[in-house]
Amino acid sequence: MDTPPEPVVTLDIRDDGVAIVCISRPEAKNALNTAVREQLAMHFLTLAAEVRVRAIVLTGAEQCFVAGADIREFAEASPIEMYRRHTECLWEAISRCPKPVIAAVNGFALGGGCELAMHCDIIVAGESARFGQPEVKLGLMPGAGGTQRLIRAVGKFQAMRIALTGCLVPAPQALAIGMVSEVVSDHLTLPRALELAAEIAALPALAIAQIKEVMLAGADLPLDSALALERKAFQLLFDSKDQKEGARAFLEKRKASFAGE
C-alpha cells in the first residue's frame, strides 16, 4: 500500500466561516512541488463544496509565502514530460473556487508563488514582502498565469518590466502599481487577512459569490456583454432571502441577520 504524502499544506476551518490554508515546507521556503500543488488542489476542491466556509485565507508558514517552484522537479524535464503533468488542472482548483480567497503574503512570493498569490481575489502583503517573476533568469517564462494575470493587474508597462527583468518588487511598490490590495506591518499580515475574511464571511453568501463570478467573468468580455451579465446576476439576487432581510433591516434601522439563502 502506498504511503500518503506528508501534509505540506494544512487546512483549518474556523467557527466564523473562514478557512485557513497554510503551505508549510520551511526547509524549501515553501517551494511548490508536486505534493504542495496536489494538496492545495485537494483542499480548494473540498472548500468549494463546504457550506460552512464563506471565505478562505491562503498563507505560508515560517514568514515566507512561496519562494517559487521546486526547480529540482523540472530542471531536466522534457516538453512532453511537462505537458503530461497537466499542472493547469491543479491550478484551476484555486482559480475556479467560487468563494473569496485572500492571500496573506510575508517574505517572498516569487515565480509560482507570485502566480499563486495572483490566483487569489485579495492580496494582503507584509511590508517586507517581495514579489517577482524571475523565470527569465532560468531561461524560462511564467507558465501558470504570470504573464496574463500580471498584465491584467498592473498594465503592459509594469508587467513587461517585471517579467522581462525578473526584478523583485517590494510590497510598497507592489501596492502603488496595483499588484496587491493592502500593505501592513509584517506581524499584522495574517490577522488583517483573517479580519477581511471574517468581514466577507458575515455578508450574504449568494451576493458575494455572484460579485466574484461576475467580476472575473466580465473582465474578459466586451463591456456591453459584461454589463448584461451583471444585470442578470443583480436581478437573480432578488430571489434570495438575504436580499429581503437586508432591505428590511435597512428600513427598520437594525443589523441584518444573513442566513446565506
Image (cartoon, rainbow, N blue to C red):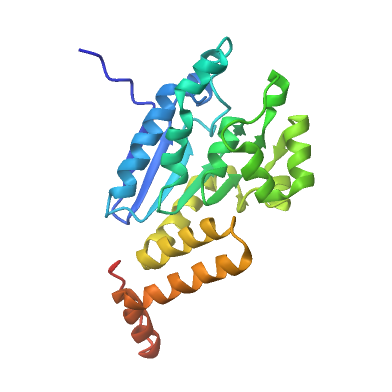
Q: Is residue 209 left or right of residue 66?
A: left
**Quarter of image, res 16:** bottom left
Visible residue check, residue 256: no
Visible residue check, residue 103: yes
* Residue at position x 49%, y 46% in the image: 190
Q: Point out the image quarter for the N terminus.
A: top left
Taking the view exactly as shown, the residue that stands out farthest to the left is 1
Residue 103 image position (x, y, % from top left):
51, 45
Q: Is residue 214 left or right of residue 164?
A: left
* Residue at position x 52%, y 17% in the image: 80
Residue 118 image position (x, y, % from top left):
57, 43
Q: Is residue 137 above or below residue 191?
A: above
* Residue at position x 45%, y 40% in the image: 92
Q: Nearer the viewer, residue 85 or 19?
A: 85
Q: Is residue 207 above or below residue 22?
A: below
Taking the view exactly as shown, the residue that stands out farthest to the top is 76
Q: How many marks?
A: 0
**Quarter of image, res 6:** top left
Q: Nearer the viewer, residue 131 or 139?
A: 139
* Residue at position x 59%, y 38% in the image: 145
Q: Nearer the viewer, residue 205 or 59?
A: 205
Residue 27 image position (x, y, % from top left):
49, 19
Q: Point out the image quarter for the C terminus.
A: bottom left
**Quarter of image, res 66:** top right
Residue 105 image position (x, y, % from top left):
55, 41
